[in-house]
Amino acid sequence: MIATAIAAPAAAPAAAAAAIAAARAVLALVLLVVFYALVALLVLVWLAFLVLGLWAAGEPESTAPPTSVILACAAFAPILAGMVWAVVRTARPAGPAEGTVWVSRRRAPALWAAVEELAEGVGTAPPDAIRLTTEVNASVTEDASFLGLVPGRRTLYLGLPLAVGLPPAELRAVLAHELGHFSRRHSRFGALAHRGSAGLAAACEAIRSAAAANDLVRMYAGGPLLLLRGYTRVFRWLTRPVRRRQELEADREAARVAGARTVADALRSASALEQGWLEFIAGFLTPVRRAEGRVPDDPFRAFAHLVEAPELREPFAALRARAAERPADRDDPHPDLATRLSRLARLPDRPAEGGIAEPIEVPSGYAVELARTLYPGRGASRGTTMPWRDWLGLLAEHRATRLLGPLAEAVRTVEKAEGISGEPHRGLTIQRVLRLLDSGRRMPLARALGSRVPPPDEPGRGPLGLLAEALYVLIGAQLVARGSAHWTMNWTGPGTLVPPEGIAPETIRDWADTAVRLPGETQRLGLYVAALGVDERAPLPGERAPDGAKGTEKRPAGISRPSGISIAPGVDAPAQRRISGIRVLALTVLLGMTAMSWLLWANRGERTYPGTGWQPTSTYDPAAGGAGLPGELPGAGGYSDWPTTTAPSLPLPTAPIWTPGTLLRPSFDIESLVPRRTP
């Protein structure tokens, strides 16, 4: 009794919160239905204005065609078309997301086995399909029809960067969280809320695109866009608390299966991996693709190498520690991480049985197939793709030799300023740098180099330290070109040179630093370099262009340098098609209504003449004093046995029609004068 009395007050707030969430869900459903009905009503109103404008143009009292109605109909046509397209696209089941790869049970048995085991643990059926994505995220969807009332096909989306970057136990916790949405039947309301929010956002985007593509549409788009934005905010305000409550419920389901501490660690790690993945794309993958024209066949394995790098353990640990400080976005259906972690800390920690979790392997073939979606444009052809381990070596060389370009420009600048005759056709060589050092031009060369590179991370190094580093890189590049050394990847700085056997890694750096700072030590450096088999007069393999000319970059045949530079934002092909469609639609409605209105307005004064049959009418009127008696010819003063009629009046002027004269009987009878024949 006491336990029941204590539990009753605690259950009351939960029941009230559930009732409020249910009311919000019902109201969101009503708003979504009202939005669909509103779009249909706007289409009917537009058609009514169209008919009204054409009818007004043909009125006899009209002094001019209804120009304002014509312009309004032409301007609102693309707006309504975009809204209808947004409703149709989001009302039906979306199907598989673009840029994803379907995972079969036969090729990925370990992944499917783990998902089925976790689905049984949270008390739900396994998903119908698993698809891999390029995002650091996992999600579930259900293609429910009739606004989420009828269940449909359920799909689990798993981000491959998340799969390769998380420990096995934390990956299982993430999967359990997503499957927890299925067990609590969150996916149906989630599909409803997502479609409604996506439909409203797509309608707003359609109006913005139409306004940006056409000046006429821009004049009328402000009002509808403002109203639609307000409607979108109200819809999201209603659905956001419900979806955030569902996320907390899914966290509890995952904690029950995988343990609360493991779920909390997975949330922190996912936040850190998201930032690391963005940095990998922007700082490593894209620059090498632009400079060298090469991409890895499996960028996700390369990203896993970044995550496991010893030099990045502390930075990733700092990101995990600061993950809870990131506030949640206003429209994010997930609560802020601090709230989720505090709720998990209140739950009892029940670690999963079985000890250390087994790794969940994803076949590399899926990674290779999914990697093609990371490379926009022409994609990754055979000539641009290389094994990911070789790509790491290329990345290390690219990061290590970034000083060679500025060094070559600095050498040319100082030689030209000092009037020193160089060897432009030979490119950058060790000899050209040492000659400037011997002639006392070390400071002009150091200042010229410093003006061409960003400020160093070590302020105390000074310009001569930067010049010594560039000379060290030049010597290392010559050794790598000869095949006696190689670069290793360092994710926090330039690549590290692995010198020939018997030489310490810092020895060559000390040689270069001594030659730069101490006059007269350049000859000693030349002897050291010659002992390693490097010709100080030999240019680098990629530096054969003369001074003042553009060097040829190491690019495959399929990658070409852009012909020009534009500061205008690029527009992809789908956007160009949308812009063209908007312009064509507005112009078609404008010209069509203008032509029809002008025709109706030009003929507005002409009477309409309905066709009637010709009916003979008798003119006999006994009360008229003999006028119109049978046999009397009106206006002729005689009689006739022919029927008399009144011809109908013709509505249109006609040419005179000749009618034959009426046959008249003689007024006297001669039969009495003719003698009768006798028998």
Image (tube, rainbow, N blue to C red):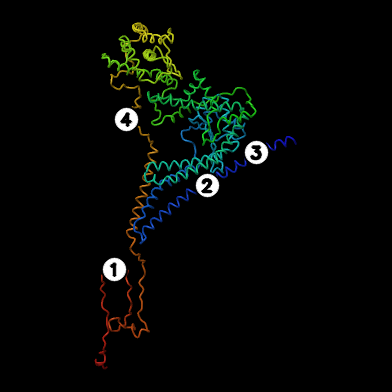
Residue 88 lies, in percent from the top left, at: 47, 44
Disc 3 target residue:
13
How far separated are the C-alphas under marks 1 and 4?
72 Å
Question: In the picture shown, does residue 10 fall above or below 81?
Answer: above
- Label 1–label 4 contact, CB within 8 A: no
Give amino acid for label 4: Gly
* Secondary structure type for disc 3: helix
Q: Which badge, 2 or 1, comes first in the chain's sequence?
A: 2
Q: Which badge, 2 or 4, comes first in the chain's sequence?
A: 2
In front of the other: label 1 or label 3? 3
How far separated are the C-alphas under marks 3 and 4?
65 Å
* Secondary structure type for disc 4: loop
Instruction: Place residue 48 in its image quadrant.
Output: bottom left
- Mark number, residue 653: 1
Q: Of 528 and 389, which appears nearest the observer?
A: 528
Residue 536 lies, in percent from the top left, at: 33, 10
In front of the other: label 1 or label 4? 4
Q: Which badge, 2 or 3, comes first in the chain's sequence?
A: 3
In front of the other: label 2 or label 3? 3
In front of the other: label 3 or label 4? 3
Q: Which badge, 3 or 4, comes first in the chain's sequence?
A: 3
Q: Residue at x 55, y 34 (%)?
A: 334
Q: Which badge, 1 or 4, comes first in the chain's sequence?
A: 4
How far separated are the C-alphas under marks 1 and 3?
89 Å
Give amino acid for label 1: Pro
Disc 2 target residue:
33
Q: Quadrant of the C terminus?
A: bottom left
Instruction: Place residue 522 in its image quadrant.
Output: top left
Disc 4 target residue:
564
Left or right: 567, with 244 as reference point: left
Mark 4 nearby-residue class (10 Å; few <14, some 14–19, many ≥20): few
